[in-house]
Image (cartoon, helix red, strand yellow):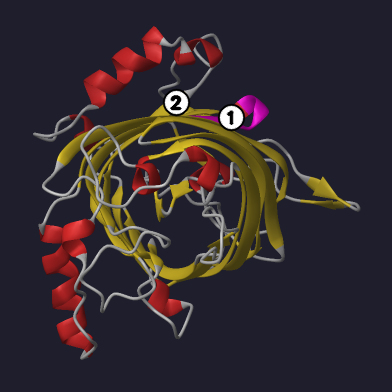
Amino acid sequence: MLLNSTFAAESVTDAGNVSTNNENRLSMTEKYNSGWAVYIDNDLFSSAETDRDYTGGLAVTLSGQRAQEFLLSTDNWLDTIDRWVRFDTLYQKSPHFQLHSFEYGFTLFTPRDTSIAEPIFDDHPYASLFFIANTEQTVIPANKFSYQSTLTLGILGLPVAEDVQVSLHKLTGTALPQGWENQISYGGEPTAKYTVSVQKTLTNIYRQGKSDYDIKASMEGNIGYSTDINAGFSGRWGRINTPWWSFNPHQAEYINLGAPVVADRLEGSTSEFYFWAGFNIKYRFYNAILQGQFRDSVVTFSSDQLESVIYEGWTGITREFGTGLNVSFFVRGRTAEIKGPNARKPLWGGFIFSKSY
């Protein structure tokens, strides 16, 4: 059942402090253009030693009904897959509403020493992914569940990855990378990934900008160029005027997946300013960024050279500047995925600029 009106949010209490019985009447009708977000990741933001492991990425998300209509939109394919795997049966019998987004971007990976042109067989291989992705988020207000599915289509190994990094190094005046001809699937190879996740809000209290918080648990599965299952917890604390289902920091395999940007706000709140943090545990079955895909690659790792269990954590801060314009800074880190003497714990930072309408 798809809701097309509004609902009165549930009452929230704590230690006798009762928030309004109507936190906000949140719109169930998706706007044609609900907003946009820009994600910028780079290890430069978290470490003095740059260009190793996950070097950085850039992604742009466009939200609203328009995400279903873009020339390269794969929304119809995503719906077909959701029905085929019966993901939609998890929510179709409950009152719910749906949001959509379209994302495009790229991610870059390098070994520690980028001054060597020859293959480096005991360190993270050069790798790149240029991608587009469609996301559908389904929210069940009554029990605070949010379901999300994403279909990502991309190309590994494009030579333009070197041009991107060379341009960045010229801007910063640093040494130019030399080994991009050794990257995974060099020359280009199509790839894809299907993601499903469920998020449950365990508790939330909104006091109209006075020590608000929400805490959520999440589970996710991926199949494709990154195949894994993972689960974790996340939370945010501070002045919050956006609903619990609008915050999805767990949706990130390196760069953030493009969760829909929304404008619904809690009544009476001041501008947002909150801290956030979380962690998850991942069991990885396959990673094309390290193991390669079908095309021959100069440097790859076998499954027994990689850790299967990976822990990841993140923390960040979000500040609202003007209605609906948010800027976030975050740091993410994970345990080493490559075994051996060059095993490292990737650490990177990033900025998120978003605008909701």
Q: Residues within 10 Å of mark 1 (few under 14, many from 20)?
A: some
Residue 146 screen position, x and y as percent: 54, 32
Q: Residues within 10 Å of mark 2 (few under 14, many from 20)?
A: many
The residue drawn where x is 12% and y is 34% is 72
Q: Kindly check if marks 2 and 1 are in contact, taking CB atoms under 8 A apart as contact.
A: yes
Up/down of 349 relative to 262, above or below: below
249 and 105: which is toward the camera: 105
In the displayed structure, does residue 214 sit left or right of residue 344? right
SS for callout 2 = strand
Question: How far is mark 2 from mark 1, CA to CA?
Answer: 9 Å
The residue drawn where x is 40% and y is 28% is 98
- Magenta stretch, residue numbers: 142-148
In the displayed structure, does residue 245 sit left or right of residue 133? right
Residue 95 screen position, x and y as percent: 53, 17
Is any atom of residue 1 visible in this view? no
The residue drawn where x is 43% and y is 78% is 45
The residue drawn where x is 63% and y is 61% is 277
Q: Residue furthest right?
A: 15
Query: Mark 2 is on which residue type?
Result: Phe
Sooner in the amino-acid sequence: mark 2 or mark 1: 2
Residue 280 screen position, x and y as percent: 64, 47
Q: Residue furthest bottom?
A: 173
SS for callout 1 = helix
Quarter-of-image position of residue 178 = bottom left
Q: On the image, numbered disc 1 is attached to which residue?
A: 141
Up/down of 3 relative to 26, above or below: above
240 and 289: which is toward the camera: 289
Query: Residue 143 in magenta?
Result: yes
Query: Mark 1 is on which residue type?
Result: Pro
Give the number of the disc on residue 97.
Answer: 2
